[in-house]
Image (cartoon, rainbow, N blue to C red):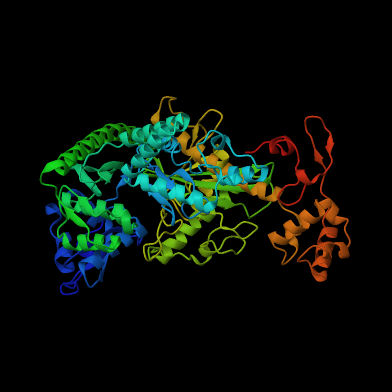
Amino acid sequence: MADPSSYRPKPGEIPDSPGVYRFRDEHRRVIYVGKAKSLRQRLANYFQDLAGLHPRTRSMVTTAASVEWTVVSTEVEALQLEYSWIKEYDPRFNVKYRDDKSYPYLAVTMNEEYPRVQVMRGHKKKGVRYFGPYAHAWAIRDTVDLLLRVFPVRTCSAGVFKNAARTGRPCLLGYIGKCSAPCVDRVSAEEHRELADEFCDFMTGRTNTYIRRLEKQMGEAAEEMEYERAARLRDDVGALKKAMEKNAVVLADATDADLIAVAEDELEAAVQIFHVRGGRVRGQRGWVTDKVEEITTGALVEHALQQLYGEETGDAVPKEVLVPALPDPVEPVQEWLTGRRGSIVSLRIPQRGDKKALMETVQRNAQQALVLHKTKRASDLTTRSRALEEIADALDLDSAPLRIECYDISHLQGDDVVASMVVFEDGLARKSEYRRFQIKGFAGQDDVRSMHEVITRRFRRYLAEKEKTGEWTDGENVENSETDRNGENVGTPETDRNGENVETPETDRNGEIVGTGPTEDDGRPKKFAYPPQLVVVDGGAPQVAAARRALDELGIDDIAVCGLAKRLEEVWLPGDDDPVVLPRTSEGLYLLQRVRDEAHRFAITYQRTKRSKRFRSSPLDDVPGLGDTRKQALLKHFGSLKKLRSATIDQICEVPGIGRKTAETIAVALARSAPAAPAVNTATGEIIEEEPGTMGSSGEPVTMGAPDERRGQET
């Protein structure tokens, strides 16, 4: 625990002007970002008597080891810089609203030649029109199913669309009239785009125009005694009205507004947002946050506005934002919102009428969300705390292991040996700090030796980062801590045989990085900067001994080590002849099992990735200057790698883009490589003749049967 007086700035050093300040901990990680109209007055509040500070503020200033600030010209600039730094550094003591789920949107991909209607989650893409968010994806699909009767816009994926265009036959929706089938040229690209524009117009609230037009067409069809057409139009009108009923009118004046309500107690706050477009509620979402600092309702609203509109522009920011309390001061926030929209945005508290009544509804939703969250959170926190306490008691630790790292080795009968490191903090997985390793020190299968190498490399890097930040104080020689036994720089990410980074964070389903790890000297993420309280290895006494020996060799004696053996789920400690047996109903054992299983999953996923890359390799990969386009051209021209091997240099030169010198290089590379083994059906033992349709992506024939049947079992 740091004493705030040890890093308090000297009198007169802090300017009396607007700016943004950052508190850092002993590892140089940014733990809090704030803004102020007057930096001098605001920072003075943090360095008063600790007894007078809010408990969470007191925890922040005692965790911090330094403070720095940046002066800006206006409060609007301070607001923008604060938002940017919170997004960049992810400070642990700042208010961060946690989306209780990834809300789905109804999206129309207007950036494509043939726009597509679909459900989308995650970050918004340029050129795509979004409607929502919706509480459930099925609500979007129900609405779209009704509207496709009137606006038969494409909903199929790119693969289905291309296949229909190739075969000349539309999908089922094209046959039943719920798609205009642009894939088979029933409508032109321009006509299909007009349908998509009308679909978007209807979703934005301009509904009466289309209903009146359809009713007029229905009347004309009835007068001309085209009763079947009139019946179809009648059903179309009914579908549109039914879709409209899903979003009842709440504001009669067709207002575009967002309503934000906050429910809070001393520890947490819940935020609910209703998106009203054209007088109808088009979307709803909610967030929950821990109140890690003493903060007013107006400040909570300000953080919610940053979260909502920090990356939005144009019409995504409504003309009117209704809130329960105004930020103090309100002018910079209103000016910032106006800048995001490009026109004036009204930020105010509703006082009377329909808007006040709707705000009360949003407030009730916020209260219910907070109650539900606290009910779930209490159970989760209690269970996790009990699990950590049971682990501390069983392993005789001084305190509960708030950060646990688990390591596992994976290989396929000695090939592609890799290791994984997973991190659990407060009993929850922190996937942003997962890391992957290749075993470099030796070849073959030796789990004990592999574990020793991985632990050595991980904590050698920790010592290197500790030295860089000035925390190394015992005077030991750490010159060799920057390189591994092969002389490689261990302060840089691991790379595979293709030079690709293999220690990157995990990503979500959209391919986006799910978080950040420890930090660089400027507060940005850095690998391996934090030590765990407990290292768990997947294995028994030999693996535990190897991990303990690696730590001892590095002079690290303040990190506990244990192993969890799969067979009997026994916990092994270094130097003990007998394992620690936790009860089967123990929450601590369950947590260790989850940590171990997650490390195993992460390791075997990486091992399979490396194995699949090796299986897809081709002799053509070794030809310098031969890219994917010309490889595909060669394989397409000859039909298989076997036929390419038997081709003459003159025949290879016939392929477009292949000159004589390149052809000679290809012929030499293929001559040096051994012929590929024939494909075998493992069920019958039959050798399968190589055909163009059986080639893999590299041009090699595909071998039938699962990898495990060919090569053995993975570990």
Q: Give the camera-side residue of 255 and 240.
A: 240
- Locate the N terminus and report the quarter of the image it occupies: bottom left
Residue 232, percent from left and from top? 45, 32
Is residue 374 found left or right of 462 in the rendered image?
A: left
Instruction: Judge by depth and name the residue closer to the eye, 116 or 484.
Output: 116
Q: Is residue 485 visible?
A: yes
User: Count the marks: how many?
Assistant: 0
Hey, which quadrant is residue 141 in on the image?
top left
For the point 41% across and 45% down, the residue is 199
Residue at the limit of the structure toward the bottom, as seen here: 12
- Quarter of the picture containing the C terminus is top right
**Front residue (pair 132, 663):** 132
Identify whether 231 is placed above or below 707: above
Q: Quadrant of residue 673?
A: bottom right
Up/down of 677 relative to 1, above or below: above
Question: From where the camera sits, is residue 409 visible?
Answer: no
- The percent coordinates of residue 124 (x first, y second) are 41, 52
* Quadrant of residue 600 within the rendered picture: top right
Could you tell me residue 11's position as x and y percent?
Answer: 15, 72
Left or right: where 36 falls relative to 505: left
Q: Residue at x 66, y 46 (%)?
A: 612
